[in-house]
Image (cartoon, helix red, strand yellow):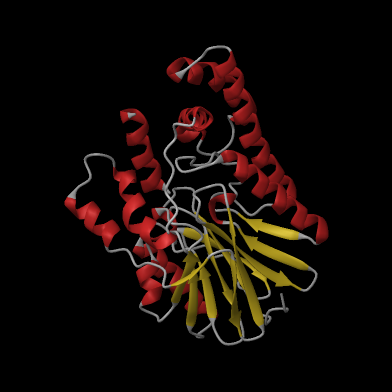
Amino acid sequence: MRTLILLLTVLVCSRSPALQGQAAPAPKPDAALPFTLKPLGHGIYAAIDNPKGEAGANAGFVVGDDGVAVIDTFENAPAAQALLGEIRMVTKLPIRFVVNTHYHLDHVAGNAVFAKEGAVIVAHRNVPAWIHTENLKFFGKNITPEQKSQVENLATPNMLFDSSTELRLGSAALRVEFFPGHTGGDSIVVVQQDKSAVVFCGDLFWRQTLPNLIDASTLPWMETLSTFTKFSAESPILFIPGHGDPGNASDVAAFRGYLSDLREWVSGAKKDGKTSAALVDAVLPQLKQKYGTWQLFEYFAKRNIADVEAELNGTKRIPSAQP
């Protein structure tokens, strides 16, 4: 995320069955790793970006009877290679699948590392084209030929779906489902564990962290988050965010509250006749009072306000769905 945050800053300034049990090693103390590996039981692992942001985002993997599924691949190949190394410390089973939860660079830049291992890359149907086109905007108007080449040569998904699909690792099943909100091509991965579940949310959930709203439609996103909390009413669920530590239904509700507050406060400022910089100045103190301790506040607070203003005005550009 660090690279993506810096690029966004430039833009702002310029404008079901139980899984096979696995021995769960303790989180790696190796300071050289760009993430912390968190065993969640039943062969499920979360890879949480380190405080320096060296992996760029969270990822994870699931070990089944006959293979491994990886969820997201970080913002750079070295971090993805480090994740592959950790997987190989757990199992020698083949990497069968990679799921890209959405197209953003900080979640897909390591795809090629796992494609070389023979993995099928799975995503919503909007993701492949957006990987090679929409990711260019994060580098701004002065994108270099090298940066453009990097984006254009990212490995893209080769197994696509519209609303949902199921991936099997022997007796282990992973349900991949599309939900609207963050980009228009976002997926979650649901891994059932007897009477509970782990849900890898990608960037549909940010735990105590301000989100990137550059492509967002906040009203359907709030509806998505309400659906997530309904999931938890049926069985205990651990939600793995795209950024931040794993959370529960209360954390998801708190994040939904952020989007709701943001819409309400921006709407109120608009009714008072505020626009542009004056609107940002009016809303920012409210936002800081309630959410100023959340991660990435200084990076995204002003941009979030401006993005929601554009959304409410009907002038915000969002990626176009693929035909």
72 lies above or below 321: below
285 lies above or below 50: above
Q: Is residue 23 among what the camera can see?
A: no
Residue lying farthest to the front in this orientation? 323
Q: Quadrant of the C terminus?
A: bottom left
Q: Is residue 250 among what the camera can see?
A: yes
289 sits left or right of 71 in the view = right
* Image point (20%, 54%), residue name: 146
Q: Which percent across, then down, holds residue 301?
A: 50, 30
Q: Which percent across, then down, holds residue 155?
A: 34, 67
Residue 269: image quadrant is: top right
* Image point (54%, 41%), residue name: 217
257 sits left or right of 7 in the view = right
Q: Which percent across, then down, holds residue 244?
A: 57, 49
Q: Nearer the viewer, residue 298 or 135?
A: 135
Q: Nearer the viewer, residue 45 or 112?
A: 112
* Image point (44%, 78%), residue name: 119
Q: Which percent across, then down, holds residue 93?
A: 51, 85
